[in-house]
Image (cartoon, rainbow, N blue to C red):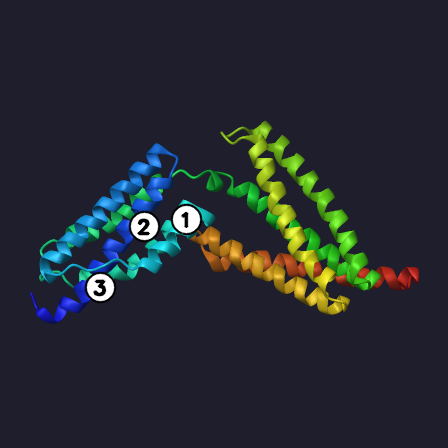
Amino acid sequence: MNTSLTPLLLGYQRNEITESHIYRRLARIEKSPDNRKILEKIADDEKAHYALWKKYTGQDVAPIRWKIILFYWIGRLLGLTFGIKLMERGEDNAQIQYSKLKGQVAEIEQIIRDENDHENRLLGMLDEERLRYVGSIVLGLNDALVELTGSLAGLTLALKNPRLIALSGLIVGIAAALSMAASEFLSTKTEGGGKDPLRSSIYTGIAYIITVASLIAPYLILKNPLVSLAVMMAIAVLIIALFNFYISVATDRPFKKHFLEMTAISLGVAAISFCIGHLVQSLLGVEP
């Protein structure tokens, strides 16, 4: 093999041993026996790839410690599936580079097959509770974004008092969160489908409450209601972007389409509500 490839292979070797450590750490904290076996299988495969590259480089390399810590905590805080799939996204480029080594590394076909197996079969077998209830989270998040951005936009022009707007938004938000949670409980109980009605309602309610708290925060901090409105809309777009990125990674859904769709709906409802607030104020002759 061409010795000029050694630095490249050392990079592959370091990446393989790093990912082996990440999968092994995640396996130790995984409660599901089935998920633990899957993670241990991938860790073993990555370690075998490390040994294969070592055969060509003749050197030992240390794992990337910061990457191990980063993805370990991403997996713990944001979910096993999200953390692993985010890490595996880098494998797509690696597989393209691997294909260029055909004819120079005898085992390269097996490595490519293993990497495809990790993504297509093993990761598809992971069963994580939060992803089973992602529909409930979407329901709470989407409804809160649409309802609260609209309500707060309308209240901003009608009341013009940030504290009063925040108070009104909080009351509306909490009442709506309880209503949505109860509706999700009854809906899940009626439909069945293997999901726990109580858990579904909790996920919906929590998503709603977190969104409500985020959206009314500017009105509690800032004094200018119009500035608060602008910041609130920016927060809404940020929430939509972060959530859709999470879903796109964890469930392999397209990011752009869902992001633009949710953003257009939320901003559209807010604009209409703002106009309604102005119209009502003019028709009733109410001055806050």
Q: How many marks?
A: 3
Pointer 3 residue? 11
Mark 1–mark 2 contact, CB under 8 Å?
yes
* One can see residue 252 in this view: no
Of 276 and 21, the residue lying toward us: 21
Identified by mark 1, the residue type is: Gly
State the residue at coordinates (76%, 69%): 224
Residue 75 shows which numbered tag?
Answer: 1
Pointer 2 residue? 22
**Farthest bottom residue in view:** 4
**Which x, y percent locates residue 212?**
67, 51
Q: Is residue 47 above or below residue 271?
A: above
**Which x, y percent locates residue 271?**
71, 63
**Farthest right residue in view:** 285
Categorize mark 3 by other alpha carbons within 10 Å: few (<14), some (14-19), many (20+).
Answer: few
Compared across the picture, whether 47 is left or right of 134 comes to left
**Quadrant showing the C terminus:** bottom right
Circle 3 sits in a helix, a strand or a loop, which is it? helix
Compared across the picture, whether 5 is left or right of 38 comes to left
